[in-house]
Amino acid sequence: GEMHMEMLNAMETIGFDDNTIHSILRLITAILHCGNITFSSTHQTTHNSFADSCTIDKTHSSLTAARLLGVKYDDFVQALTYRDILAGSNEVIRSPLGKGASEKGCEALMKAVYGGVFDFIVERVNESMSKRNNLLDVGRGVVVGGSASIGVLDIFGFEIFLTNSYEQLCINYTNEALQQQFNKYVFKLEQTEYEREGINWKWITFPDNQEVLDLIDRRHTGMLALLDEQCIVGSTDAKLARYLYAKCDERPRFSATSAQRADFKFSIEHYAGPVEYCTEQWLEKNNDQLPVSSANLLMGSEFDLLSKIQKFIRSEDRNGRGSVASTSVGAQFSVQLSQLRAR
């Protein structure tokens, strides 16, 4: 409709050619078809024992998704229903995945491709703006030290639900950082300026939430750093929870009752109030890496745009574990938040 045409016109204006626009829309369509893929459970005999396995239902959506991604259908099925792990120097062990694991793998593939396309678009927009800015400077005979940029701040609301997970920690962490930014500029700096100018002013006291920020993002000892450590060593949700208890028990804003410890939960005293968190799936969410079989599938694609977005896709290493060198979701989130606050 009208909004679609407006988007296409905007892409042309920013410098996307017709082939790139078509390729982006093709990938988005492939992702939408992946969302309609269904799996059926089967059973296989592996090493004299039965193993849960599954297969992709051969439907219009599954066939179209493979075709749009530029891969063979059989390879597409193998990548989503089997897990490859390197054993030794050359031997690859291929084990079947159950229906639930394959569904999660399909979701990971969709998320990775969509995230790669998004980052590709952002990079192209930045390049286009930088070129336009440089041309403008040259035309004016002016040399400047920086370039134009666009910042997007998605304002989060403080979240507290019956069950709070990793997403809520990131959202509430953002709120803590923005609250401190607000306190700094509205209270601290303004009141300091009043004092400097000799204005008759009654100092307003306000709670300082630095302890919460230190608990979450302090280098080496913050919860995000501790989570990264556990991701690297291949820990479990239960081990992560016990590690957090051992490292954070003495921190002023952290608490965990006996009942919470039994369920691998803990509480943080945020500026808006206490929030109980559950550590289930934190390791997986923080890694957020594409299984190596799916990564190999994309690398073997004949689709040119998939090759271009490979650098934006985070995947497991050949051993089926997260890469130590890759940046975790928490680390990326913290860096981006720091950059935002520094602007």
Image (spheres, rainbow, N blue to C red):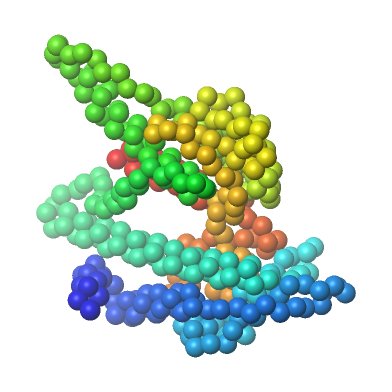
Quadrant of the image containing the C terminus:
top left
Residue shown at 29%/33% (left/top)? 182
Q: Is residue 266 above or below residue 7?
A: above
Instruction: Using the rendered view, name the quadrant where residue 208 is placed.
Output: top left
- Residue 252 in sight: yes
Q: Position of residue 100 (x, y in %)?
A: 63, 68
- Quadrant assignment, res 23: bottom left
User: 120 left or right of 134?
Assistant: right
* Looking at the image, residue 22 lies above or below residue 330: below
Query: Closer to the camera, 281 or 28?
Result: 281
Residue 149: x and y in percent read 26, 52
Using the image, determine if residue 298 lies above or below residue 272. below
Residue 93 place in picture, x, y as percent: 76, 70
Q: Residue sitting at 51 percent across and 28 percent down?
A: 253
Quarter assignment of residue 183: top left
Residue at the spot 74% in from the left edge and 65% down from the top edge: 86
Residue that appears at 41% across and 67% down: 117
Residue 210 higher or lower than 26, as above or below: above
Query: Residue 291 location in percent, x, y?
Result: 61, 65
Q: Is residue 67 visible?
A: no
Looking at the image, residue 3 sits to the left or right of residue 48; the answer is: left
Horizontal side of residue 301 vs 194, given as left or right: right
Quarter placement of the N terminus: bottom left
Left or right, 175 with respect to 132, comes to right
